[in-house]
Image: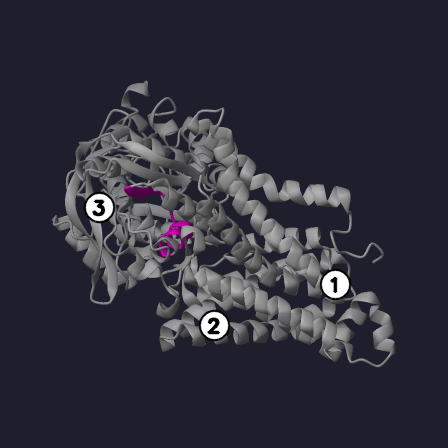
Amino acid sequence: MFALSAVIALPTFADGHKAKVGMITTLSGGGSGLGIDVRDGFLLALKGNNNIEVVIEDDQRKPDIAVQLADKMIQSEKVDILTGIIWSNLAMAVVPAAVNQGKIYLSPNAGPSALAGAGCHKNYFNVAWQNDNLHEAAGGYANSEGYTNSFIMAPNYPAGKDALTGYKRFYEGELAGEIYTKLGQKDYAAEIAQIRASGADSVFFFLPGGMGIGFMKQFAQSGIDLPVVGPAFSFDQGILQAVGAAALGVKNTSQWSKDLKNDANVKFVADFQAEYGRLPSLYASQGYDTANLLASALNSADINDLDAFRLALKKADFASTRGNFSFDTNNHPIQDIYVREVIKEGDVFTNKIVATGLKNRSNAYVDECKM
Amino acid sequence: MSISLFLEQVLNGLQFGVMLFLMSAGLTLVFGVMGLINLAHGSLYMIGAFSAAAIASWTGSFWLGLIASLMAAAIAGVIVEIVIIRRLYKRDHLDQVLATFALILLFSEAMRWIFGAFPLFLDVPDILSGTLSLPLGIEYSKYRMMIIVVGILTAIGLFALISKTKLGVRIRAGESDREMIAALGVDISKLYTLVFALGAALAGLAGAMVGAIQSVEVGMGEPVLILAFVVIVIGGIGSIKGALVGAILVGLTDTMGRFLLPSFFKIFLSPSSATDIGSALASMMIYILMAAVLIWKPSGLFGNSAK
């Protein structure tokens, strides 16, 4: 286990405007690119901030390790706030226990439907999206493009199920096929053969990380010429360089893109490139926004008065890289979801916005949340 | 379901099987000849993929990348054998597992330190991109066809090596009785290093070929390693023939299972339950196969019962 402790300030916590944050994220193994981006965005926002101490640990994408780290952070590090988890299965293992122990959890990524609906909690805030959102926008975009026979695919785990549910919620056509693949599967020859035989007019898939790289490359090789739509998770800045030209022209949905023209985002993209020597991905923007939300709440409220602090978080009075940002009643964002296209800018593959998929989208689980 | 879809899936199963064979051949040789359980075999696969990606992006040639993968994996194999593995032959299997597991962690972090946390780019060469039109309306990827061909050629080459050359005789003798061939004057350490390097080179080649159509990232070798162990258990430890038959069996079972089981359940269940149950069962198929083979033949299909 790798313990990376980034101490930004020495604590004297009598001051209620200072806080200690425990970040549990994936920093090693496959999928570590996402955790590294979230961490880098988070730390960039807190540069020069002496009120927030951050303790960072690597969950190695294993739920049991994440649970142990959460226990350690709450009991021995005595953090006030937890954040960082990338994967929905790890979030489901850690978040319910943490919020029930009175700790605030700010999710910079995972947004499982269980925590947005019946499992919602006043201490749990999701700063990224609810898992279904980006997929809902993809479904809406498929309708507007006139696709009527989609082949859809996702891995068999909570976020994968949310993905296909979200797409089907807005997509109005027929399904040429629906497959749940194995989490971590790299070879999609069998599934691609089924796509070819199905008579589909479009393909929608959610395969984060290395899974998506493998699928896109194999799909591009297969000679099947169908439009592909997906959420940004398979086409983020970190993944695109590994997929290369196979991804050009693919439409992907995201709540953020580097070409969003608000002041906060322009500064964020420039600062991130200067600090880390690479372009940020949506995960980095999520980490950055989470840190800024936290800093804004700490400025206006006292961490020792949790009710006031929660209200300050809910107000979301900070400059988000997405422009307008507000929370709905179940503590998930209300935001625009854009449609981006993969393009090549010079030597680098990146995304540019081509349409707005959904405006002011909240989520489908608001009514199930009894807060 | 059409005949061309079915046949395309059979070809996919064959290609998967052939890739598993390249991984398992090295593993079974090392286990059979040297009695060594090598968990770091997956790391050699990863080293092959990373070297191919690095050299291919530096020189612009996929083929140079492939050659680089063979060399890098073989060299890594030689170094690891001389420095660490050599001390493990006389030890307990558990010690070997612990030591080679530590090697996995070492190699993973080393790759991340050298190449960064994000996956690398490796693509198939232009000459092999696109599909081949086969009879019965099957469109099959040219690159996957190449993998099948390379795998078959490697199998033929290995069989020729084992049965027709002096090195092959020594390998077979070493599998039967290690102490005897040392007593007969064969230089055991050189033989072992050679066998280890050969296995490593094959793993590296598999990594490079597969890396071009999947992803080149840290930790890519471990899932394949697990499958390779399943293959050699099914095929019988130490037997190249067993590795080939086992690999094709596992490749076909897994591919056809993933494709046929959900369709089968769709006949009498709703589509979403069918996909749920079908995919869950499909991911268990190869382990069910392994259990069935072991019940029937405890030493594997071609294994020796006296070891």
Applied colour scheme: one colour
Q: Chain of mark 1?
A: B
User: Can residue B187 be found in the magenta stretch?
Assistant: no
Which of the 4 image quarters holds residue A214? Answer: bottom left
Q: CA distance from mark 3 to mark 1?
A: 54 Å
Q: Which residue is mark 1?
A: B32
- The amino acid on which the numbered mark 1 sits, given as a three-letter code, is Gly
Name the quarter where the C terminus of chain B is drawn: bottom right
Gap in angstroms between the C-alphas marked 2 and 1: 27 Å
Tell me the kind of residue under disc 3. Trp
* Side of B244 relative to A103 (left or right): right
Q: Which residue is mark 2?
A: B66
Where is residue A368 shown, x and y percent of the image? 32, 20
Question: Relative to residue A333, is residue B237 drawn left or right?
Answer: right
Dot label at residue A256:
3
For this rendering, which residue is in front, A97 or B36? B36
Same chain, labels 3 and 2 = no
- Tell me what residue is drawn at x 54 percent, y 41 percent: B257
Q: Is residue A192 above or below residue A120?
A: below
Q: Count neighbours of disc 3 (C-alpha within 10 A) and say few if under 14, some if 14 to 19, many if 20 or more.
A: many
Report the Cα–Cα distance between label 3 and label 2. Answer: 39 Å
Magenta stretch: give its range: A201-217
In this rendering, would B267 be left or right of A241? right
Q: Residues within 10 Å of mark 2 (few under 14, many from 20)?
A: many
Horizontal and vertical percent for residue A176?
34, 36
